[in-house]
Image (cartoon, coloured by chain):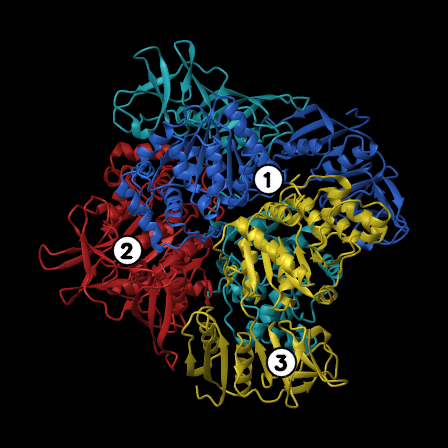
Chain colours: A blue, B yellow, C red, D cyan
Amino acid sequence: MTEQASETVEIRGHLIDSGVLSRVLDDIREYDGDYDMERVDIGHEKTDTSYARLAIRAADEDALQRLLMRLQTRGVNLVQPGEVVVSPATQAGVFPDGFYSTTNLDTKVRIDGHWVTVENPEMDCGLVVDRSGPTRVYTLAMSDVAVGMEVVCGASGVKVKTPAPISGEDGGFAFMESEVSSEKPQALLVRQVADQMREAKRNGKRVLWVGGPGVVHTGAAPAMVAIVNAGFVDVLFAGNALATHDIESALYGTSLGVDLAIGKGVEHGHEHHIRALNTIRKEGSIAAAVESGVLTSGIMHALVTHQKAFVLVGSVRDDGPLPDVYTDVIDGQRAMRAQLRDVGFCLMVATMLHSVATGNILPASVPLVCVDINPATVTKLADRGSSQAQGIVTDVGLFLEQLAMELVPAYRPG
Amino acid sequence: MTEQASETVEIRGHLIDSGVLSRVLDDIREYDGDYDMERVDIGHEKTDTSYARLAIRAADEDALQRLLMRLQTRGVNLVQPGEVVVSPATQAGVFPDGFYSTTNLDTKVRIDGHWVTVENPEMDCGLVVDRSGPTRVYTLAMSDVAVGMEVVCGASGVKVKTPAPISGEDGGFAFMESEVSSEKPQALLVRQVADQMREAKRNGKRVLWVGGPGVVHTGAAPAMVAIVNAGFVDVLFAGNALATHDIESALYGTSLGVDLAIGKGVEHGHEHHIRALNTIRKEGSIAAAVESGVLTSGIMHALVTHQKAFVLVGSVRDDGPLPDVYTDVIDGQRAMRAQLRDVGFCLMVATMLHSVATGNILPASVPLVCVDINPATVTKLADRGSSQAQGIVTDVGLFLEQLAMELVPAYRPG
Amino acid sequence: MTEQASETVEIRGHLIDSGVLSRVLDDIREYDGDYDMERVDIGHEKTDTSYARLAIRAADEDALQRLLMRLQTRGVNLVQPGEVVVSPATQAGVFPDGFYSTTNLDTKVRIDGHWVTVENPEMDCGLVVDRSGPTRVYTLAMSDVAVGMEVVCGASGVKVKTPAPISGEDGGFAFMESEVSSEKPQALLVRQVADQMREAKRNGKRVLWVGGPGVVHTGAAPAMVAIVNAGFVDVLFAGNALATHDIESALYGTSLGVDLAIGKGVEHGHEHHIRALNTIRKEGSIAAAVESGVLTSGIMHALVTHQKAFVLVGSVRDDGPLPDVYTDVIDGQRAMRAQLRDVGFCLMVATMLHSVATGNILPASVPLVCVDINPATVTKLADRGSSQAQGIVTDVGLFLEQLAMELVPAYRPG
Amino acid sequence: MTEQASETVEIRGHLIDSGVLSRVLDDIREYDGDYDMERVDIGHEKTDTSYARLAIRAADEDALQRLLMRLQTRGVNLVQPGEVVVSPATQAGVFPDGFYSTTNLDTKVRIDGHWVTVENPEMDCGLVVDRSGPTRVYTLAMSDVAVGMEVVCGASGVKVKTPAPISGEDGGFAFMESEVSSEKPQALLVRQVADQMREAKRNGKRVLWVGGPGVVHTGAAPAMVAIVNAGFVDVLFAGNALATHDIESALYGTSLGVDLAIGKGVEHGHEHHIRALNTIRKEGSIAAAVESGVLTSGIMHALVTHQKAFVLVGSVRDDGPLPDVYTDVIDGQRAMRAQLRDVGFCLMVATMLHSVATGNILPASVPLVCVDINPATVTKLADRGSSQAQGIVTDVGLFLEQLAMELVPAYRPG
């Protein structure tokens, strides 16, 4: 990019605490602009305000004006604001091209060398200059534009002021920031996960999966089996439920209910469940059941067949459990830790309990993606310190179908 | 309570399986009525229908009539329906006291000894008898009442019929009752939706889509464009947001944020949004923007190019809005109603507001599938009376990708 | 299907209102069985109970027995129950094939011509006949099976009874069926819970609480302490987190973050947490820390001081844990079972894991209220078979404040 | 506070973009420490890393060590790290007092003048120095501590390194930040809202309410009536639903269903709803219905009686609507704007549509609190630019009960 238009801007306030400066830099990036940080004064005392001055650049004057208008929503102003530029409206209900799109901040406009305060600030409107009497500037909604109105265009001559933070005696409540964000469509996210897995394998690393019973309930077991067969699951951490539902499905061919976000699952009284547990307990272990020909399909069967590791750790709500399940959770944690060597990528799917448990013991250097239809699972993981976690809020069944199609060229949904 | 008014009513159908009889008894209790169960015939075979006859009682005639109208929403009719009673409207926009409040079931009215079929059944409206030519009876919204219209009052002479359960060859999907249930994995659900669309087209019916901006945010616009091009969208109901985000994406190539279940959307201050609105307002309409070469891609472009209908109805949070948007919601409802003829299947995607609005006016005989990552949307639809609604709680972006692959053999995700 | 095995069964109760009959027919269909409805008597008055008798058929004797066991979870019994059939266990921790899988309903078993009442009904267990002294029949978890135990097989000779609906003077609250419904404002619900607790105490019964860390995060610990002091908590089931956060708050006076519905909790890296664990481990137990004067306030302190029981069962995500925590989940389940005697009311607050675990082992005859801001928790409980569960979706902090004001006249929010 | 202990620390990385520096300052505040920002170098180019050096102070050496350990979780290190300090464990399963609580970052420990890399980093553990052979340092879980192990204490001699950001070719996915956070228990939040309302009234400002039908469904109408009567509602923005359900409740005394988070509301077919609409349409307006004695209680009655303003704006899903409802949404927006003069505080309760619409037109200088049981509503508001919004995720009914008790001393829940 050869930028041709540039301006110097400044901002003052609690830039670091509030994250405003970080968002300003994001905006510049998002608008394909560039910047030099000319000066940053950060308050020494925690009550001091900070100041930043940046030279910003964009591809052309039009792009620069739009970036300037964007930055004003953050409280950023031109160092040398100049005079306002106006243009008449030529159609009712339509602003002139390049109109200044307003913020809801206190705004001033420089006209004939004087700053005029904008009446009734409101976001996503235009600014109209009225010189019929003493000069006024007011906010106007697009649908109320009349022909001939003088509308402010570009950011020149416009200045905004961010409000002081609201606070009670002891600091007030926290401001909100929104979360679990992504700038990419879902299909691209699936591809990126596949790429990270392939890269881990190329580097001789192991891929760790952490899964909940939703993998089975959403009908994605065949997709996961295909991924195991293709060598992209080196170790699985799970609980009694994933393994039991997978085995129940393999033994009885039951098509289980979809595990929806609101918690609707397979009914407990469904006696296939308890009967599958009994069958495997009788065999002594999952591997023994594969060996003896009792268990012939499903995720657990695929793991045993390919000699992949799995660590199943129990919880207080378990029935049975399967003989392979660690009923002592501290023993289970130790078994999980013993499987972390050479793990180069971790995918967590549809389980809050085991995802948080894995996040607790995983080094920050291992890339980690958490997929769940429930945003709370993803959020909780990050809150508990696994800051490297990347969250994808989506349908687990469809996600695994698409991941299988990415990783296993021959795979087709059933 | 000494009941003074009583009537004998009957109902026929899958009373036990479907829970209908249980709900009828609940209604009677809730309306402070009482009943004797005079006769119950429950089918011996599981395909047989059942029959129940009840004597119901209420405190007075007025209470009885209201109870009868309530029970008709379940499919309960008077054993001796008698003749319809009408009363003239004396105020515009107001029904006479005691007016019959409609269901969305197939309805007949007995006039002069003959049963007349009610035109365009819709719930929560009134019934108007028009004897100006051959006797007609039609549904009318409250806001469209004119002075002098003959409006049906009370339940006398009115008979409704519940639709037969919707079912495919292997039993179809389960019906939803205030909760979202499915016995099938997601990939199969996508196929069933595709089959229902193909069947509707084979029968010469039109396919109605109802969409929210999530269709664009999840990156599924190319998939929907492919489906429009293939002829599986005959009419779209939406708001200002879907169309604006689609057009913004077409004009500025912005990759919008993923609209997650918890409401994470595109940031408001993003000035592309308001600038896209201004551009289309300048052209005069979406079709004019396509005509003039300003708008060259996206969902709205595809609809205009293929001469498919769309009805955009505004809401109080809209910016702009686009010139095609009905800003008067009652006008918008009328425009939506006018597009319901010959609709044989309806798919609702990622919008609570417009889904409920469409559910309000759609006959119960039109199969209806609602797709949303938020179970609340699906549940709310069923709670409000659209009992034919089938809910799929999944990721909208991945769902539309898979639906496009089903319906358009050549389609591949971007 | 040519059915070869058949039996005649019957059920009595509010079959229509409650939807039970509908669910029985669903079960038969789901198990590939068939039926003739031989007799249905539906009560004429709304307080009358109904009765149904069905001939049911299945492909073979084994399929029939499994269908019979399934139907018993609905309260359906054989018309001619016959004698119980037992088979000896030949492996520790494993039931014999065809074992009777229990419900949580009151159950009787016919042995030598007499009906013997089953001790401690619990779902998803087996029934053991002990003839070493006077004949006893008791429920046993799979993991506790010893070689030689006489285990009931098939449904022959087994009879269950559904509990009468719970109701207050004016009808009580509605029962939950996979969804959360209430016809009463929240303030009234709080009062009804208080009334149920007072009634349990009046009848000499114990009140069981099941709690998650949200009790502490929402600032409700002082309210719960007041309720413990007033004698309305006889036993607490929880995990490591509730106790640790309570103790951390007591030791360090940290004001913890509010635990929102979406999972926002206290940050993991917060080293107070791990330090509090170390302190109690050093003392040897929570009681020892109270004794030595290290722990002087909070919920756990109140329980120790008033000599109330608590059972803490660990999970795989635990740090520490506290020395009182059962790290083996099967041991934990046994400890919970041992505390169920004389429990007359159960309140579950802000925990999915321990609520489901408790629901698994609690007889259906114990009234049970589940309070959570997340509807999924409440729904999941009912889905898993705890059909007596009443759900209240509300803010846990404000709920406990109001409950304390109801139960402890002198209590005022901090 | 007279701080007596101090140290100089430094941090290097993408401090501004990532928000890390902001979180470091938060931590110092939370631990009651203080700081001087001695030096900040922010990269001029966007790919440059930044650097910050701070002098930090705490009340005593112990507090300082704990603050240092906390800051290390962010990647902050001592400028002069010194040598590690170890202390022997004297109890199995228990760390010595003042033990170093680990992060999951790459960690080095300075022993005898050399940096030793810590094996298997894991958070919330301790560090053990093993000099039995060549010196090793490894992470150990609390439960695995053996007597005599040399455990690192304090932050001296410990250095951590944050991982480089994970990124794909085009920037990778966004990192997650958690949201809707509060450090106060709910009861305190209610009081702060009450204080803000009282302050607005003291300053001669008006209080704006924005409400959804949940206000009525949760049984909070009496609480809101009390607040209107006490003068704390100057203007109400709402839709057709709030007013209709309030009036329906006033006219028919129906106790409406609780509007739960999952969207379970009053059933649509409930004909009281449509009948209430008809009654008010007949009267011509809500005020006329109050005047004529038809409407004698409820929220709308209270507003009319006290001559308070309300603006009702319709939506496409409305039945009726009430004659007072603006059916044209642009007219509705204009009517809302006209009521914004002198508004000094705004409370939004249980409505996403009208909250976002109000957020669109409200100046950023007006304090704004949004209360909803659904976190999505709160999040969406902030995402769309209303950055002054403070969110409270709680039960609307209990919140309004407690707010009424705060604002109206005589008020008692019904």
Q: Are marks 3 and 2 in contact (CB under 8 Å)?
A: no
Mark 1, other Cα within 10 Å: few <14 / some 14–19 / many ≥20: many
Q: Amino acid at mark 2?
A: Ser
Q: Return the residue at label 3.
A: B108
Mark 1: secondary structure: loop
Residue B176 as seen in the image, left or right of residue D211 = left
Depth order, front residue of A209/D146: A209
The image position of residue C405, as x and y in percent, is 38, 59
Chain of the residue under the numbered disc 1 shown in the image: A
Above/below status of D366 relative to D287? above
Type of residue at label 1? Ser
Q: Is residue B35 above or below residue A104?
A: below
Tell me the chain of label 2.
C
Instruction: Give the residue at mark 1.
Output: A181
Say if labels 2 and 1 share a chain: no
Q: Nearer the viewer, residue C344 or D231?
A: C344
Chain under disc 3 = B
Question: What's under tag 3, amino acid-wise?
Answer: Lys
Mark 2: give few (<14), some (14-19) or many (20+) Cα within 10 Å: many
Q: Position of residue C6 (x, y in %)?
A: 30, 66
Tell me the CA gap for discs 3 and 2: 51 Å
Marks 2 and 1 sit apart, C-alpha to C-alpha, by 46 Å
On the image, numbered disc 2 is attached to which residue? C101
Question: Relative to the observer, which residue lies in front, A377 or A294?
Answer: A294
**Which image quarter holds the C terminus of chain B?**
top right
Q: Quadrant of residue D221?
A: bottom right
Q: Are marks 3 and 2 on the same chain?
A: no
| Residue C64 shown left or right of residue A4 in the figure | left
